[in-house]
Amino acid sequence: MRYRVSHFNGIAVMPDGSNGATIDLGILPNALGGAPMHRRDASLLRRKQFEVGEKERMVALLGTMIMDFENVIADLNGQIAAEEDRSRIKDTGHPGYSTFALAAAKRRQNLFISTARMKLLLDAAKRELDEVLRDLESIQSNQLPPAPATSTPAAISTAR
């Protein structure tokens, strides 16, 4: 027999409309079969898991941006060297120095600065990720039985 549950007062309503037994909706069974978990605890766990995912994405994004910047810097180094070889003028103070090489050198300098800032942001993002992972582990250790090795945040991260 199926029951409809009123989420406002925790009363089960029988199909014929009569009241059934009272159900405590503040407690949900643990998804892994462990002890019951309160809704607020489950919500906190989901929120921390979401935060971990967001922080992991941010770390990956910053790492990708740094690699892209470094690749562009290497390309610019090659372009500047080729332009200096073509014009046979390597002194940036010389009036005949290539304007293309000057512009490329300025862009390269800006990318060096941006890369340094991205590395600082990456370090901060990694620290934030470590902090959120510690929070998640403490929540899981207080509320859930130990998760299988394949469902830990670290295993999930490596599987992606």
Image (cartoon, rainbow, N blue to C red):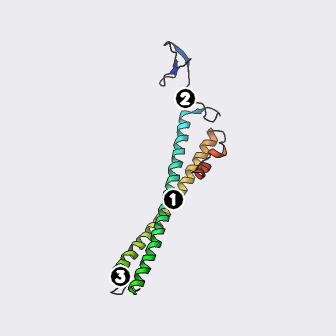
Determine the CA span between mark 3 and mark 2. 73 Å
Give the residue drawn at x 55%, y 37%. 42
Q: Is residue 27 above or below residue 82?
A: above
Determine the CA span between mark 3 and mark 1. 39 Å
Q: Is residue 153 left or right of residue 75?
A: right
Give the residue drawn at x 54%, y 53%. 129
Give the residue drawn at x 53%, y 61%. 123
Front label number (3 vs 2): 3
Which percent across, then down, holds residue 114?
A: 44, 67
- Toward the front, the furthest residue is 86
Category of crowding for the residue at label 3, using alpha-carbon neighbours closer than 10 angstroms: few (below 14), some (14–19), many (at least 20): many
Q: Secondary structure at mark 2?
A: loop
**For mark 2, what is the residue?**
26
Which label belongs to residue 2? Answer: none
Residue type at numbered disc 3: Ser
Q: Is residue 98 left or right of residue 156?
A: left
Going from N to C along the chain, the mark reached first, 2 or 1, is 2
Note whether residue 32 is visible.
yes
Q: Secondary structure at mark 3?
A: loop
> Residue 41, located in which quarter of the rendered image?
top right
Which percent across, then down, holds residue 155?
A: 62, 49
**For mark 1, what is the residue?**
124
Residue type at numbered disc 1: Ala
Q: Is residue 1 above or below residue 40?
A: above
Give the residue drawn at x 41%, y 70%. 110
Going from N to C along the chain, the mark reached first, 3 or 2, is 2
Residue type at numbered disc 2: Gly
Q: Is residue 110 left or right of residue 58?
A: left
Determine the CA span between mark 2 and mark 1. 37 Å
Going from N to C along the chain, the mark reached first, 3 or 1, is 3
**For mark 3, what is the residue?**
98
